[in-house]
Image (tube, rainbow, N blue to C red):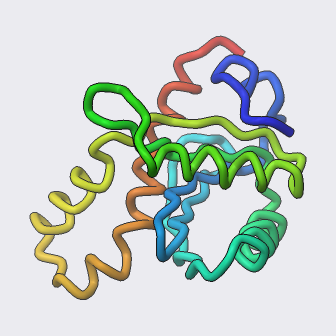
Amino acid sequence: MAVLALEEFLGAVPAGLPLAGLDLGTKTIGLALSDRSWRFATPRPVLRRKKFTPDAAALKKALDDEQVVGIVIGLPLNMDGSEGPRAQATRAFMRNYSALDARPAMFWDERLSTVAVERAMIEADVSRARRAERIDSAAAAFILQGALDRLAAMPR
C-alpha cells in the first residue's frame, strides 16, 4: 500500500492492534511500537542496516511478529519545511518497502525529534555510549507518540 495522508491512514488501520514508528537512519532503523489502545509508544531494539533487501526483510519480520497494522515513518524535513537528501532517501525507502508490505503507512514530521530525545537522555544522565545505542529507537518512540496523540484527537 502507498503512504497515506493522516485522515486516510486513520480510516485504513483497524483499531485494537499496534502501530509501529520508524526512524530511518543511515546505519540503523529505530523501531517503536504502540500499545493496542494507541496511547503509548515504546522503543524496541534497533535494526542494523545492511542493504535494502535484508533491511526490508528484517523490518517486515519484526512488524509481522508484533501484529502491527500500520506504520508511522519519521520524515526528516529541513527546519524551513523543505525536503533534503535524508527526506528523499526516506521516501525512496518507503516507496520500495510498500511494494513488499501492504500495511498502511504515513509520514510524520520528525524535525528535532532526535534533538529532543538526546536532551532528555542527557538530563536523565544516560551515558554517551548508552545514548548512541538507544537514540534511534527513542526517536522512533517520540515520532510515534506524536502521531498517536494526533490520532487520538481525531474523530474515528
Residue found 86% across the figure and 39% down from its top: 1
Q: Is residue 54 above or below residue 141?
A: below
When asked about the image quadrant of residue 154, the answer is top right
Left or right of residue 135, residue 17 in this image: right
Left or right of residue 73, residue 43 in this image: left
Q: Position of residue 40 (x, y in %)?
A: 51, 48
Left or right of residue 136, residue 94 in this image: right
Q: Position of residue 89 (x, y in %)?
A: 55, 52
Whether residue 108 is visible, yes or no, is yes
For the residue pair 35 and 9, the one nearer the viewer reads as: 9
When asked about the image quadrant of residue 146, the answer is top left
Q: Is residue 124 above or below residue 147?
A: below
Q: Residue furthest front?
A: 85
Q: Is residue 22 above or below residue 73?
A: below
For the residue pair 60 and 35, the one nearer the viewer reads as: 60
Left or right of residue 5, residue 17 in this image: right
Q: Position of residue 98 (x, y in %)?
A: 81, 48
Residue found 40% across the figure and 49% down from its top: 142
So how many labels did they put on this image?
0
Q: Position of residue 63 (x, y in %)?
A: 76, 64
For the residue pair 72 and 82, the one nearer the viewer reads as: 82
Residue found 48% across the figure and 31% down from its top: 149
Whether residue 144 is visible, yes or no, is no
Image quarter in which the C terminus is found: top right
Residue found 23% across the figure and 50% down from its top: 116
